[in-house]
């Protein structure tokens, strides 16, 4: 029986991907482990490896195709002993009448499994017939009510009209907690006949009408920019941010950095084997701060707080067209030199779009440093599932008062963005104070 090769879900949040290149052509024999295609997500380009043996009978989606939905048929492989032409003709028939797209990300197909250049993933699954979504509720006047499937089921079971529930999810979406709040007829209930007012951004045509024709060019959004826009919008709409700012005197840190780098041995190329940066100290300080204030090392979920045992620190890295946040796992146990080496490797592979999903997904907190651009101070947007993110400004010589005298000191401003659902003000202040303590007294990071 022909083996369907479907667009895989390379990460839990992936909905679409770009099929950048076919490594095999129709009629080629395929063995397990052969790379048959390259798939580009918003963060990385990954090799797609076969797990079955056969012949590539038909390529359904040509290379260079963008925004291919997860679980869509992209090729058909004839199994051992099968007629290749028959398999190809069957694929052509499927292409002429494609199945509906699934409502949720489906598992990767059995015919192949994705991998990065440095290793393949272990998961694979058979292709399944996609399900169709339940029809969206309306308010009886033709307006669509945005609600999650779980919210609709709960509302139906309780006999509540979902159109009367005020949604608190993204863009006014009705979610399960809204149904629970509406059970008692509380403030979450709308008056009969009152429709929701979803937030709708101005149309493209309306925005373009504000500018003189020919005075601009349209640069289409790539996958990364679309994902960044969606996630940042969701973060600001669903996470109640508050901000805490502190100024750190870093003369001791600068001296320690100079001493550490001075001890670096030379490699065969004559260059130092390592060079610790200020950001490496900050990463270590955040990790130790989470260990000192473990109640801040959490992730918010509707069912309860996830209290983490280790400090997995995400570090924002700028790449062409956007940014990515690789994770330094168990940073509390790593030396400054280990953190420095790991970040250099992550940054190089991030710019080449060769990071594995497990290297940039998850984490418990993050740091964003714009000091190298001369930014004095800024506030960063929390990247879910993190509960905090530290924004680091530039290191500057500033006049400060010490014992009644004005002296010059190296200082930098740090701002902690906090998810108020998970971390309260006093706890956030305690965490920021711990970070400041380690930054100003770097010897504490070495003991």
Image: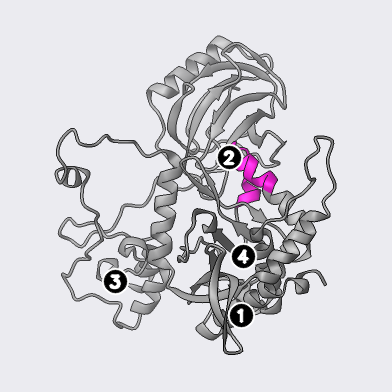
Question: Looking at the image, is mark 3 or mark 4 nearer the viewer?
Answer: 4
Query: Badge 4 is on which residue?
Result: 364
Query: Badge 1 is on which residue?
Result: 433
Query: Where does the magenta region start and end?
Result: 344-360
Query: Badge 3 is on which residue?
Result: 166
Question: Looking at the image, is mark 1 or mark 4 nearer the viewer?
Answer: 1
Query: Badge 2 is on which residue?
Result: 351
* Tags 1 and 4 touching, CB below 8 Å: no
Is 359 magenta? The answer is yes
Residue 5: give x, y in percent of width and height: 56, 28
Judged from the image, the secondary structure of the residue bearing numbered disc 3 is loop
Q: CA distance from mark 1 to mark 2?
A: 34 Å
Question: Looking at the image, is mark 2 or mark 3 nearer the viewer?
Answer: 2
Image check: 365 left or right of 144?
right
Front residue of 56 and 45: 45
* Tags 3 and 4 touching, CB below 8 Å: no
Front residue of 360 and 397: 397
Image check: 73 left or right of 179?
right
Could one spot residue 371 in this view of the protein?
A: yes
């Amino acid at each position: 029986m022909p083996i369907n090769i479907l667009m895989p879900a390379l990460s839990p949040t992936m909905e679409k991907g770009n099929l950048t290149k076919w490594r095999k052509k129709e009629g080629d024999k395929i063995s397990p482990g052969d790379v048959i295609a390259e798939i580009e997500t918003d963060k990385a380009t990954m090799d797609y490896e076969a797990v079955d043996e056969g012949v590539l009978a038909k390529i359904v989606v040509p290379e260079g195709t963008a925004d291919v939905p997860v679980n869509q048929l992209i090729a058909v492989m004839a199994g051992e002993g099968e007629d290749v032409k028959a398999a190809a003709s069957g694929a052509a028939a499927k292409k002429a009448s494609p199945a509906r797209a699934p409502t949720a990300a489906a598992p990767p197909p059995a015919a192949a499994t994705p991998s990065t250049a440095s290793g393949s993933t272990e998961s694979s699954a058979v292709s399944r017939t996609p399900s169709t979504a339940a029809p969206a509720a309306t308010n009886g006047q033709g307006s669509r009510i945005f609600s999650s499937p779980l919210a609709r089921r709960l509302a139906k079971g309780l006999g509540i009209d979902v159109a009367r529930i005020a949604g608190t999810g993204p863009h006014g979406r009705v979610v399960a907690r809204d149904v629970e709040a509406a059970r008692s007829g509380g403030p979450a209930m709308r008056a009969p006949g009152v429709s929701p007012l979803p937030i709708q951004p101005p149309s493209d045509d309306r925005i373009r009408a504000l500018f003189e024709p020919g005075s601009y060019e349209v640069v289409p959004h790539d996958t990364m920019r679309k994902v960044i826009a969606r996630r940042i919008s969701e973060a600001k709409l669903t996470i109640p941010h508050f901000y805490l700012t502190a100024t750190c005197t870093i003369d001791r840190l600068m001296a320690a950095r100079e001493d550490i780098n001075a001890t670096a041995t030379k490699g065969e190329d004559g260059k130092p084997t390592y060079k610790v940066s200020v950001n490496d100290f900050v990463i270590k300080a955040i990790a130790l701060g989470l260990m000192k204030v473990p109640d801040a090392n959490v992730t918010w979920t509707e069912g309860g707080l996830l209290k983490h045992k280790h400090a997995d620190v995400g570090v924002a890295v700028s790449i062409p067209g956007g940014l990515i946040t690789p994770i330094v796992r168990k940073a509390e146990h790593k030396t400054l030199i280990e953190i420095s080496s790991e970040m250099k490797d992550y940054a190089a592979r991030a710019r080449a779009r060769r990071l594995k999903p497990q290297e940039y997904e998850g984490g418990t907190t993050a740091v964003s440093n714009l000091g190298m651009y001369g930014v004095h101070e800024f506030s960063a947007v929390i990247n879910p599932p993190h509960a905090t993110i530290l924004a680091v400004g530039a290191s500057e010589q500033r006049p400060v008062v010490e014992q009644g005298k004005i002296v010059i000191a190296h200082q930098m401003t740090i701002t902690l963005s906090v998810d108020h659902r998970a971390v309260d003000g006093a706890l956030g202040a305690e965490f920021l104070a711990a970070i400041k303590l380690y930054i100003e007294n770097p010897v504490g990071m070495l003991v």
